[in-house]
Amino acid sequence: MKTYTSRFLLLVCILIIMAVLSVLFVGRYTLNPFHSMNDEMALTIILRIRLPRVLTAIMLGMALSVAGAVMQAAFKNPLVGPEVLGVSQGAAFGAALAILFLPGDPLKIQLLSAVFGLLALATSYMVSSAIRYGGRILRLVLAGLAVSATFSAGVGVMKFLADPLKQLPELTFWLLGGLSGVVWRNFLYMAPLATIAIIILFILRWRINLLILDDDVIISLGTDPKKLRATVITLAVIATAAVTSIAGIIGWIGLTIPHICRKLFGAENSRVIPASILLGAILMLIFDDIARTVSAGEIPLGIITSLLGAVLFVIFLSRGIPHE
Amino acid sequence: MSRILIKNLRYRYPVSKTDVLKGMSLTIPEGKVTAILGPNGSGKSTLFKVLIKVLSPYEGDIYVGGNDLRDLDIDALSKIISWVPQEEDLLFPYTVLEYVLLGRTPHLGFFNMPSRKDMEIVHEVLMQLRLSGIVHRKIPTLSGGEKKLVSIARALVQETDIIILDEPTAHLDMGNKARVLGIIKGMAESGKTIIFSTHDPNEAFLIANNVAIVNDGKLISEGPPGTVITEELLEKVYGVKVTVQRADNGQVLVGIHPNIFKSL
């Protein structure tokens, strides 16, 4: 397993470098890597347009994948992800509120989407304990469905109220999800929060394993399960909200990537978390490449991730849920 | 010398109107096997969960090695007492090695990963319990007996003086039961203080030095199995006529009295 893991890490690092180079030089305006250093126009495109986008895509993939992995551990449920528990729709509602009523400041979008993301998560958790039907996993998924539907109704109301010329395009773009138009300022707004959350979750990767145990056993091992769970879920929501405030709703990554990693490397989180971070980064770069280049106009990234993420999810799930 | 001293312990679940533990007093001797014997609902599991600080607050006093339990936080307690629950629900397919390693948590800093030394301790315990052959098996694929032994291994790598086991032989066949009881006895012989709960008086006779019979949240009797486990007392606690017989080889056997079926 050890050599298998280190080979994978090496492969992923090479793929990331290749993907970064391809994103930097391939696009609507194809650049020659050997002549770019002397070409002022090429340098401008690389440094001002493509580099912030590449870095944002990497951060987006890392944040959503790690958030999915730790939420699945924290809820002892391999079927949850930011979108299943209503976090994405809650964050969308928060962002819509900010776009409509507090315009002109990405920081407010970020803050409100984080607050409503957390609120949606807490609501899903509370509703799931009130549901008297099915097992724990089913209850949580059902509660997440109900909470998602409620917040998406709220988003619908916001769309209805939005100024069709100014606010509605911004809102629609945000809801479909994408990285077109990302500039350094966007990246720098989002990067510190997302980076801090990802680093802390990475450092806690072994400790997060405790959450798969029953609460009485966790206590007997000297750790307060409620505090640990609250800490990692808050970090996961912060990471999700930070990237979501820039990229909009990007579905299926948080659910699919940790599943693939568990299939490849086993369930233990000190492998799943780093593998999810790396695989999330590489897949997001590839998906964003596809979004930019596959047609004449850019396809919103959220559409690509939902389509390909769902296909990958079905492929991996049809080969057995990670029980055995 | 007593390892755990319980004085007039009362506990009530938050939603309940009546106490589950109704003034229980009990002494757990050091380096011995103590069996907590009692019918379903007598408060055995509740007592254990109070002892490992899963349930609080309680009334009365509990001293662990001379310290008031209230003054010990869960971090300090996790270095003194380890806990083996009756059943564990593990949904993610961790391997035996990965799962048992979690028992080293009390000895690691919050941000630390297990070291080579932790890994060595785990391998040593797995070897002692003859589980080396299944270190890379995934927990959901194990048999009931193997799962129980793996839980005990997790508690052993915690390196505590006291180990509490909640009905460790429940749902096990005779072979696995014997293996688990043998391991419990061995742990006490190596100096650990063992407390385990059971419905079956025969298990107390087989391995316990000390028996505490509890019923309805109170201690009924306490002492060596031979003096405490009598037909009269068991009949009173379980509400059914029983026989306690000594076989030629000295083994004591407890069973339901066959006459009760005639009157049904």
Image (cartoon, rainbow, N blue to C red):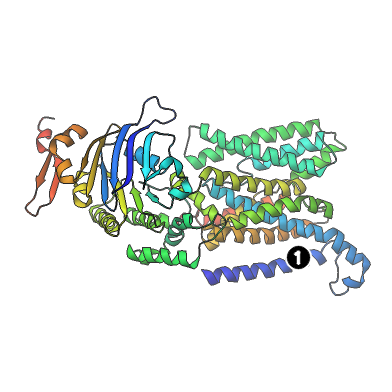
Q: Which residue is mark 1?
A: A20
For this rendering, which residue is in front, B108 or A145?
B108
Q: Residue at x 71, y 52 (%)?
A: A194
Instruction: Pinpoint the chain carrying mark 1.
Output: A
Q: Amino acid at mark 1?
A: Val
Which image quadrant is residue A149 in? Answer: top right
- Where residue B243 appears, x then y in whole percent? 11, 40
For this rendering, which residue is in front, B186 or B32?
B32
- Where residue A34 appears, x then y in whole percent? 85, 75
- Where residue A104 appears, x then y in whole percent? 85, 40
For this rendering, which residue is in front, A20 or A321?
A20
Q: Residue at x 64, y 50 (%)?
A: A252
Tag count? 1
Which image quadrant is residue A164 in? Answer: top right
Left or right, residue B253 beside residue A222 = left
Q: Is residue A300 visible?
A: no
**Crowd class of label 1 (few under 14; some 14 to 19; many from 20; radius 10 Å):** many
Q: Is residue A154 visible?
A: yes
Answer above or below: position of A148 versus A300: above
Q: Residue furthest left?
A: B248
Point out the image quarter for the C terminus of chain A: bottom left
Mark 1, secondary structure of its residue: helix
Q: Residue furthest top?
A: B17
For this rendering, which residue is in front, A231 or A16?
A231
Answer above or below: position of B211 versus A309: above
Which image quadrant is residue A124 in? Answer: top right
Q: Residue furthest bottom?
A: A34
- Where residue B63 appears, x then y in whole percent? 37, 42
Left or right, residue A257 beside residue A136 = right
Q: Residue at x 83, y 52 (%)?
A: A185
